[in-house]
Image (tube, helix red, strand yellow):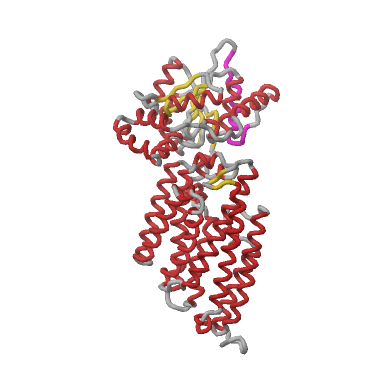
Amino acid sequence: MCWHQPANPREFLDLARFLVLFSGNLALPRQVSRVKDNMANAPAPGQAPMPVFVDLDGTLVRTDIAQEQLLHALTNGACLAKLPASLAKGRAQLKSDLADWHDLCPADLPYNDDVLSYLVAEREKGRPIILATAADRKVANAIADHLGLFDGVLASDPSRNLKGAAKLDAIRTMTGGGPFEYLGDSKADLPIWEKAARVGLVDAPAKAHGAFGDISVDLTTRPATWRGILRAMRPHQWAKNALVFLPLLFSHVYDEPGTLGRAWIAFVLFCAIASSIYILNDLSDIEADRAHPRKRTRPFAAGTLRPAEGALAAVVLLALSLWASMVTLGAGMTVVFAIYVVTTILYSVWLKNYAVIDVVALTFLYTLRVFAGGVAIGHLPSVWLLNFSLFFFLSLALMKRHIELLRIKEIGKQRARGYTVDDLEATLPMGVASGSLAVLTLTLYLNSDFVSSAYAAPRLLWGMAPMVMYWIFRAWMKARRGEIGHDPVVFALRDRVSVVTIGLCCALVIAAKYIPLEGLGQ
């Protein structure tokens, strides 16, 4: 079932046909400028036009549909149980079963508009356009029916995997051994390109470039794999892992040998482990992301990164990070990381769908970063810091849900993640109350005997209370106005006022520890 209908490729095709018919000069991107040179190769009067065969995965669409369908099967209990038996029957049968288990929505797929433009232009010149793919026939037919562009379809069925030489044989049979043009993207297409009269290269391997004479299309549309992986790692989210430095700040052990270095190692490893989870989350949310106005540009949803590439990157990144943690920070820190990984996965696949439980889980994950910072440097955070973190991050988690519900209400929906828009009236007072409890915890801490004995000028710390109070209530007001992004923690570490507030609080902590002021001490 298709839950979202983006710009329909049929509308795109109609517009492209109009441009071809009435402008006489279809404006194609720079990468396909060679198309103009090939217009002189139009068939002579009475001569049958040469057909164009186009591959599906990586050519017509930017992603690999079979990989996405396999990913769906691996994350679906019922499909996963059937997978071994299907695998035993061969790749062709597996593709057929995957197509049966997965409800494909052709309208949401990331089509390559440059390829579509070229195919429309050639079809307007009377050339037959054939979809020739190793994907299962059910998938190919669904896409062909959606686009309304093709004069024929060649695809795999349970008895034959139409790839490489098998696809070439099918093309030769259809053309009767006559000349044809083929657009493809992978090494498996090399034998087909070698026999084609004209060649179309779409993100093709390096060995394909310069190996063929008559090239109709030469497109490079995918960024380097490492760039896609880096973007999927969400570096902009790394700022929230700075929470691991809080125990270092309040324990005042900056001058102990190796302590600062261990804190930095914990920060880097937390970023790497969190990024591996982000990649896995994006893999599980490909279809939902494509239906989202902002998330549809993420690498997997946009097709700029294949699912297999992302899965490999996530597994390697996670394994290396846990190994590095064991080697550099010890077993205790590795256990903390393992708890974070398990909790995050549980949150992503289950807990996030239940109201209130989800914000409690988020609060735990934020507080766990603070606790991890203490484990890394060998100075566990005080009960005061953990209590403050509990209420403060609960307020931010509720703020996150409040912002999501505001956006859901704006687009006319009623439910999201176990909440309804009516819960806006509950999340606001709950969040403000949690923030107020964080301020209360801070003031009780500042009035404790621990602070009086640990700081040279403990009363300086009271300057933190109004600043924290100001920040919490300001953040909630901005959340109500829709002026905070989807993640309040990231906002807190990027907003100019927030950064100044954090900086002043840190300065007060250091000053109160090392600068005894007469009249402000004991």
* 235 or 472: nearer the viewer: 472
Q: Quadrant of residue 256?
A: bottom left
Q: Residue at x 47, y 21 (%)?
A: 153
Q: Which residues, given as a range, are shown in magenta?
A: 28-44
Above or below, 489 against 9 in this view is below
Residue 228 can be seen in this image: yes
Left-right relation of 205 to 87 = right
Spot occupied by residue 358 in the image (x, y as percentages of width and height): 49, 53
The residue positioned farthest toward the right in the image shown: 22
> Extreme bottom residue here?
518
**Quadrant housing the C terminus:** bottom right
Magenta-span inclusion, residue 492: no
Left/right placement of residue 19 relative to residue 164 reads right
Let me know if residue 218 appears in the view.
Answer: no
Q: Is residue 152 above or below residue 453?
A: above
The dominant secondary structure in magenta is helix
